[in-house]
Amino acid sequence: MIGPNKLILSDISFLANSWWIVLIISAILALALYFFIRSRTELLNRQNEALEDTVRIRTLELKEQKERAEQSERYKEQFLANMSHEIRTPMHAISGMTNILLRNEHHEHQQKYLKAIQESSVNLLVILNDILNLSKLEAGKIEIEYLPTNPRKVIASVVELLKLKADEKGVNFDFSIDQALPEYISTDPTRLSQILINLLGNAFKFTEQGGVELKLEVIKNEIQFTVKDTGIGIPSHKMDTIFMSFEQVNESTTRKYGGTGLGLSITRQLIEMQGGRIWVESEEGKGSQFSFVLPLNPVKLEESDEENLNEKQLKSMSDALSGLKILLVEDVEFNAMIAIDDLKYYLPDVKLDHALNGKIAVEMFQSTDYDLVLMDLQMPEMDGFEAAQIIRKMESETEKRTPIIAMTASLLTQEIENCFKSGMDNYIPKPYKPFELIGAIYEEMKRPESRR
């Protein structure tokens, strides 16, 4: 029998003689740990390289997307610039010639038709400005311009315009105005006209027999407008969606009556932007009643007629601009006709020369001493920007600086900035109002030459 002491000595002896086994196991463990760490490091390196490749590829994609977006933005701006010019140019002819016909002698029965054209061109121009000024449209920043406004005049203009539609369809058209309505209120007359034309236009569109009624009431601190018709009405399931963009009652309605489905959406936005609200009551087959309210903000004017006030200011400025020698640079015949007629009408003893493009303008400027240049921008052979730069270069050798006013059918920010960069002093939008034309000329002629 082996005793405990002998067993202990035997174990110690075994361990002492098997140190190399421990060493081998330790080496194996160390190698295993080394290869584990190495494989793990290689895996992390591969993952890091893959991540870097992904980031690099994604960065390139983002760069390409950014370049495409910037290119798309440039195309959009160029498209808007072209569309602005192409749309506003014929609008200028319509608006300008209507104004000329109105101030010249004409048959009395033509007055309402000319006024209707004038009012329609103004409203159309506001809509065009909203569409063409895409940055404001995308940001929902259509501007409301609060002015002292005679609401009865706005309504009278709208009624006169839409009476033609009522007569054409053979339906009645009635309107009533609360006697408590102030003579002048603070509102945007063009937007108010736009809202009423949208609502009344729809009423006439969907009314085949019966009539349309416009009612205006003063209720507490609000003005309530009501447009009631005896038309086709609106189904109950469509009542909550008609104020949404591109919504129509149904496809058959769209095919029969046309339209884009934007009118009521735009109307609602314009009303809400002014702190108002709109609602509808309707029954299919029995007609509709649209009502909206706007805040009542009465104002007082010392002059009873703001148009006369503008005419007085125009007369005062015009008298101070007697005897000017002006070079008009304009390639569109109709635009030139309007500008020449306006300048001769408002400016006493004005002397006018007309150049068809920038190249001819530079040649005429070189041989004649002008007080002012009215410069169109988009013209054949040489545009207004290049012509202005050449004129400024010619003037750099003299002490004189002739005011150059751009006449532009584009109101894009970049286009206006380019006018000033090329050496122009001011700009007039086309279509312009006479006040804008004479006002800009007056501003430049009365400005010290050192500040131009």
Image: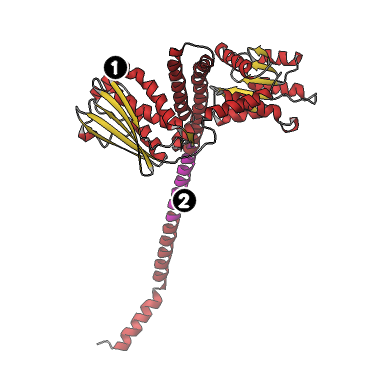
- Mark 2 is surrounded, within 10 Å at the Cα level, by few (under 14), some (14 to 19) or many (20 or more) other residues, namely few
Query: Residue 191: horizontal and vertical position, in percent?
Result: 43, 32
Q: Does the magenta run of residues contain 43?
A: yes
Please state which of the two labelled residues, at mark 1 or mark 2, is closer to the viewer: 1
Q: Which mark is residue 45?
A: 2
Q: Position of residue 232 (x, y in %)?
A: 22, 25
Q: Is residue 382 above or below residue 300?
A: above
Q: Which residue is mark 1?
A: 169
Q: Nearer the viewer, residue 68 or 411?
A: 411
In the image shown, does 403 or 85 lie closer to the viewer? 403
Neighbour class for label 1 at 10 Å: few (<14), some, many (≥20)? Answer: some
Magenta stretch: dominant secondary structure = helix
* Label 1 or label 2, whichever comes before in sequence order: 2
**Residue shown at the point (47%, 39%) measured from the top left:** 57
Residue 322 versus residue 298: which sits nearer the camera? Answer: 298
What coloring was used for the rendering?
A: secondary structure
Q: Residue at x 57, y 23 (%)?
A: 434
Dividing the picture into quarters, in which one does residue 168 lie? top left
Assess whether residue 265 is covered by the magenta stretch. no
Q: For residue 50, what is the image quadrant?
A: top left
Question: Left or right: where does residue 33 sit relative to residue 304?
Answer: left
The kind of secondary structure element at disc 2 is: helix
Residue 428, visible in the rendered structure: no
Q: Amino acid at mark 2?
A: Asn
Of helix, strand and loop, which one carries label 1? helix
Give residue 309's position: percent from left, percent from top: 56, 29
Residue type pointed to by label 1 = Lys
What span is in magenta?
40-60
Residue in view at x 45 percent, y 43 percent: 54
Q: Tell me if I can see residue 181 in this picture.
A: yes
Q: Could you tell me how far apart the alpha carbons at marks 1 and 2 are, in whole angstroms?
A: 80 Å
